[in-house]
Image (cartoon, grey):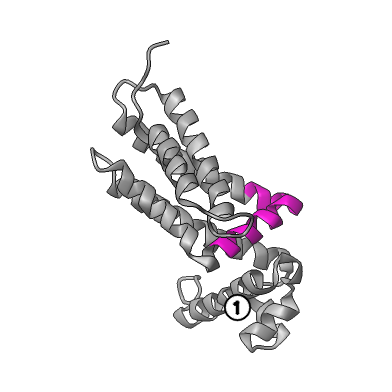
Amino acid sequence: MSAGGGPTSKGRQRRTALLDAAEQVLTGSGGSELTLRAVAEAAGVRLGHLQYYFPTRAALLSALLDRILASSLERVTALTVAHTHGADREALLDAILSDHDDPRLVRLFTEVWALAAHDEEAAAAVRAFYDQYVTHVAAFVRDHVPGLGAAEAHHRAEVFVMLMEGAALFRSGVTGRRTADTDARLREAALTLLGGAVHPA
């Protein structure tokens, strides 16, 4: 500990290295293999060393999810802010769809979703992440569709996020294959959600 009560720089580096190893185990072997012993082995340290930083699997999993989701939310925030105020909707869509070309990222989120299906603490963290993701997209939508109410912008953002996350499994090849036709229809639907005109009832 430092004099101020926080972790030292060396301690932060060691903690980061251990979380790197945990992420490696998660993406390489799956959540069922994410044990303290497996992470210690991947990190090349003694089990006791790992337990100094993360005494239990629950503590390790919580820290790992926090890091993964915080990093992804930071990217979402940067993308929506960068493309707000009249910027091209297609630029935002292209940036989000490009994540589907990153096999490591797709595997990582596939495992995170699987963990959330069996662990309520993980599920709560994932739900909080998607709540914030939707909020950022809703702000983008309202900026691009004058006169759109907050509730409708939120609904559009929810459907957009659902569409993107489901598409990740198909476009990455995990559960299907992308084609020019399906990509064209996906883009059309996504762009409509992001900034389609408001139609009178």
- As rendered, which of 27 and 118 lies closer to the eye? 27
Location of residue 42 in the rendering, given as x and y in whole percent from the top left corner: 65, 83
Task: Give the quarter of the image for residue 88.
Answer: top left
- As rendered, which of 121 and 133 lies closer to the eye? 133
**Residue at 69% across / 88% down in the picture?**
46
Q: Tell me the chief SS of the magenta region.
A: helix
Q: In which quarter of the image is the C terminus?
A: top left
Q: Is residue 115 magenta?
A: yes
Left or right of 119 in this view: 62: left
**Residue at 59% across / 58% down in the picture?**
109
> Is residue 63 visible in this depiction of the protein?
yes
Q: Which residues, given as a range, are shown in magenta? A: 106-124
Q: Does the magenta stretch include residue 102?
A: no
Q: Is mark 1 on a helix, strand or loop?
A: helix
Amino acid type, callout 1: Ala
> Is residue 74 visible in this depiction of the protein?
no
**Residue at 23% across / 38% down in the picture?**
86
Residue at the disc numbered 1: 21
